[in-house]
Amino acid sequence: MTRSDRPFSRKLVRLGFQILGRDRAHRQDLWPGLAIDKPSGRVTWRGRALFQAVPAQAIIPRDLPLIAVVGSGPSLKGQKISALGDDAAILCNGAASLADRIRPLAVAVEDERFVFRHHAMLAALPWDIPLLLSAAAIRAWAERDPRPLQDRRIALIDNLQKPIGLPRRAISHPDLRQILMRGQRGAFSVAPDDGVVITGTVAFTALQFAMAATPRRILLAGIDLSNDDQPRFYEGQDRAASGLSDGLPRILDGFALVRDNAEKRGIELSCASPVSALRQIGYRLDPMLEAFGK
């Protein structure tokens, strides 16, 4: 069974901003109460200082031996996440529930709907765990309770096509030439502090941050992209709706481009999910999370 996670009042806000015009409809991510001055990193909530955003490098060190991008696919349920160890993983959305088993580099959330549904999970995260958050996720969190965000280490997830404080722009916009790596299909950001390409899965956003940190190896875990009709590893039958299937071609185009770029840069890229659609586009199956048994 699935249900919508966006409150009806928020649906009305979205509709209202869409009526005002497509170019600036994404201003609804901030309204009401959130203000982000991206050049200075100052973030305020209802006129009061909330936190000072930090660059991603302050959260994700460069040249690590391994960065794992961990999603919440059903495949993760049968794997040994502790094999990753501490200070190696970016936990995406519901993978935040693993923070009591491994200490992550960061937790990444870009969709406000996840915050509406799982605010308690996020609010329970220890204060010293850094976050990668979109404007919409920050606002949704602050609406519930801004205290867990206060003076925390947080790097912004900004959508290059719908940037904070600027009008919507095409992926082909001249201002993005130095930021984007583009192929015949797909694109990704080489400067995620300036913004990222949003494809419909936060795992791809986290992968852009991981690539920018130039680790020797990147492991993708719990990124199945093949079974969104099943509950995520942490869910019961009352599961959240998923739009992954509808956007899968666009998502895979992005992952394919990163695969090719990682090979050229000498970054080993592999996938721990035996059922992942990433295997269909050449991602090597990595047995690391099966190494210690179930």
Image: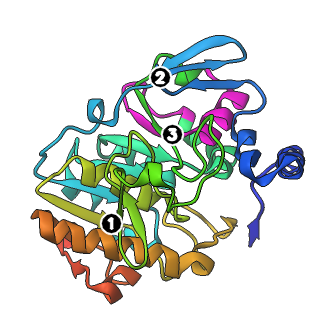
Q: Is residue 247 above or below residue 28?
A: below
Q: Are marks 1 and 3 in contact (CB under 8 Å)?
A: no
**Is residue 89 depicted above or below 217 in this figure?**
above
- Which label belongs to residue 133? 3
Q: Which secondary structure, mark 1?
A: strand
Task: Inspect the image, locate mark 2, and give the three-letter code of the amino acid beneath it.
Answer: Gly
Q: Tell me which numbered mark, 2 or 3, is placed earlier along the sequence.
A: 2
Q: Residue furthest bottom?
A: 280
Left or right, residue 89 beside residue 27? left
Give the SS element for disc 3. strand
On the rendered structure, is 53 left or right of 9? left
Q: Is residue 131 magenta?
A: yes
The span from disc 2 to disc 1 (Cα, nearest Å) is: 31 Å
Q: Residues within 10 Å of mark 3 (few under 14, many from 20)?
A: many
Mark toward the start of the polypeptide (1 vs 3): 3
Relative vertical location of residue 110 with respect to residue 30 in this rendering, above or below: below
Indicate the amino acid at tag 3: Leu
Total number of numbered discs in the rendering: 3
The range drawn in magenta is: 123-146
Q: Nearer the viewer, mark 1 or mark 3?
A: 3
Q: Position of residue 110 (x, y in %)?
A: 55, 48
Alpha-carbon span between mark 2 and mark 3:
13 Å
> Where does the image place residue 34, in percent across and percent down from the top left?
68, 26
Circle 2 Cα neighbour tier, 10 Å, few/some/many (<14 / 14–19 / ≥20): some
State the mark number for residue 221: 1
* Residue 41 circle label: 2
